[in-house]
Image (cartoon, rainbow, N blue to C red):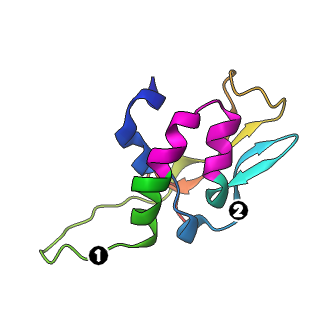
């Protein structure tokens, strides 16, 4: 169901923040934030490639200050998913989750 909500694509890891570190690990290949389009194709989510390329990727590379006061509340020290391990290359089963530091939803960089 997550795939059907187009706005969820904005929660994906930014290539400028996560770099070449693997986010999804399989026996055949690892996927970093720079390879999300390939990952979408691998999991059978080709419909997500174009919206990601057209709408999300440009925003990941360019942020403009909102020109109004903003308060951000972040957390650290909370167990947060960092990587997904699909060792048998089967994206239809639940992955093993590798945890790291973050706010419980977004991994710390």
Residue stretch rendered in magenta on the structure: 36-52
Q: Residues within 10 Å of mark 2 (few under 14, many from 20)?
A: some
Q: Note whether 41 is above or below 36 in the view shown.
A: above
Could you tell me which residue is drawn at 51 percent across and 39 percent down?
48
**Mark 1, residue position:** 64
Q: Secondary structure at mark 1?
A: loop
Q: Note whether 59 is above or below 37 in the view shown.
A: below
Residue closest to the far left: 68
Quadrant including the N terminus = top left
Asked which quadrant contains residue 62, the reply is bottom left
Q: Secondary structure at mark 2?
A: loop
Asked which quadrant contains residue 2, the reply is top left
Query: Which of 56 and 16 lies nearest the eye of the viewer?
Result: 56
Could you tell me which residue is drawn at 70 percent across and 28 percent down?
91
In the image, which is nearer the foreground, mark 1 or mark 2? Answer: 1
Number of residue marks:
2
Task: Give the x, y percent position of residue 81.
Answer: 58, 45
Query: Which of 64 and 75 lies nearest the eye of the viewer?
Result: 64
Please report whichever mark, 1 or 2, sits nearer to the chain's N-terminal start. 2
**Mark 2, residue position:** 21
Task: Give the x, y percent position of residue 6.
Answer: 38, 38
Could you tell me which residue is drawn at 43 percent across and 49 percent down?
11
Residue 99 can be seen in this image: no
Q: Note whether 22 is above or below 3 in the view shown.
A: below
- Left or right of 23 in this view: 78: left
Task: Give the x, y percent position of residue 88.
Answer: 84, 29
């Amino acid at each position: 169901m997550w795939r059907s909500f187009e706005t969820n694509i904005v929660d994906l890891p930014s290539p400028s923040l996560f770099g070449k570190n693997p986010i999804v690990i399989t026996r055949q290949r690892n996927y970093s934030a720079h390879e999300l389009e390939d990952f979408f194709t691998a999991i059978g989510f080709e419909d997500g490639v174009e919206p990601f390329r057209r709408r999300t990727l440009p925003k990941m590379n360019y942020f403009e200050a909102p020109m109004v006061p903003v308060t951000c509340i972040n957390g650290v020290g909370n167990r947060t998913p960092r990587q997904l391990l699909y060792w048998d290359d089967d994206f239809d089963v639940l992955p093993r989750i590798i945890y790291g530091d973050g706010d419980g939803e977004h991994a710390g960089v």
